Image: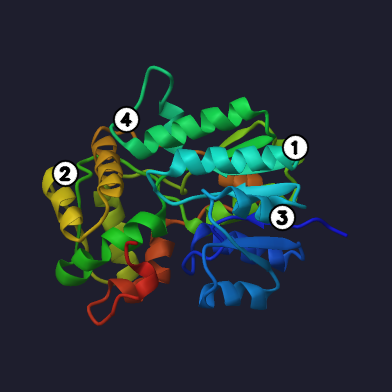
Amino acid sequence: MEKPILVTGAAGRVGAIGRTVTELLLKQGKSVRAMVRSEDDRAQALCDMGADVVVGDLLDLNSMHKAIAGCETMYFGMSVSDAYLAATVNVAAVAKHHGVKAFVNMSQMTLSQMSITETTASPQHKLHWLSEQALNWSGLPVVHVRPTVLQEGFFLILTPDSVRESNQIRLPFGEGKTSPVAVEDVARVIAALLANPHPHIGKVYHLTGPQSGNMHFYAQEYSKALGRTITFHDVPVGSWRDGLLARGLPVHLVTHLATMADLHRAGRYDRMSDDVLTLTGQAPKSMQEFVSRNAATFTVSAKRPEHERMP
């Protein structure tokens, strides 16, 4: 009997990486154990798709034994959190105990610019870097996947309000270039790695969209997709950060987002990679395609769906 592939974070909102990976693997006929944090409608939907749903907490030892036992291949992904390193080490320890043969780790592309002597102001970047180090030290058969900024995870959350209200993308990116990648493309890469992990053990993959441009370029992409003129308006990082805090977002997350903005302004997100195409055989989706797919969210009459709000 085929051993199940474990996918953590499987009950994320519609379009989230873990959920999309689960859907892709099930469509391939794979046996999938989907780890969720609670039994709710999203967990039931995974059951209805055919996944073996297990409820657990990445920080809880017993939860992870229950989730990992019997799995040889797994995907580890976790949202921005000040407990990220502790969760990574907890999961890794249990994975090693159970003899996991392929551990696909979701990381982020900024780590390619970090080292034992180079870091950033984001505590999350530091936790990600330390987590990669810990996984490498663990001796687990790891594959690191490092996407750049996500189209859905950033632009679908932080740009619709200003686009609807004033036909402006209001972000503190200056003239910096960026190459946002679609969640669907990241998920397709992860599903491909999980389906046949062994040729990729020990490798690091960097995932970007099909082009790198500044926000004036992407304002044109928004304009083409929406059929109206959208412009880019640069805003100071400080006031943008204050606005995020006023919305009630956690300080840890806001500090991470503000650091991303500073790095964009410094040209540190001007990145390109062919790994999506190489690993999946399909070119990554463009920002114009992303905006077209989500056009309703960027229109005045649109009410913002709950799954598109910042957690």
Distance between mark 1 and mark 2 Cα atoms: 42 Å
Extreme top residue here? 117
- Give the residue at x 47% y 30%: 130
- Residue 53 image-quadrant placement: bottom right
Q: Which residue is mark 1?
A: 199
Q: Residue at x 42, y 44 (%)?
A: 83
Quadrant of the frame with the N terminus: bottom right
Q: CA distance from mark 3 to mark 4?
A: 34 Å
Three-letter amino acid code at disc 4?
Thr
From the top left corner, tell me how far across and down residue 290 is, in percent. Answer: 42, 63
Read off the residue under disc 2: 237
Q: Which residue is mark 4?
A: 120
Work out whether 61 lies above or below 291.
Answer: above
Instruction: Tell me how far mark 3 sits from mark 2, CA to CA.
Output: 41 Å
Instruction: Tell me the CA gap for discs 4 and 1.
Output: 32 Å
Q: Residue 5 has which mark?
A: 3
- Of the numbered discs 2 and 4, the one sitting upstream in the chain is 4
Asked whether disc 1 touches disc 2, contact meaning CB atoms under 8 Å apart, the reply is no
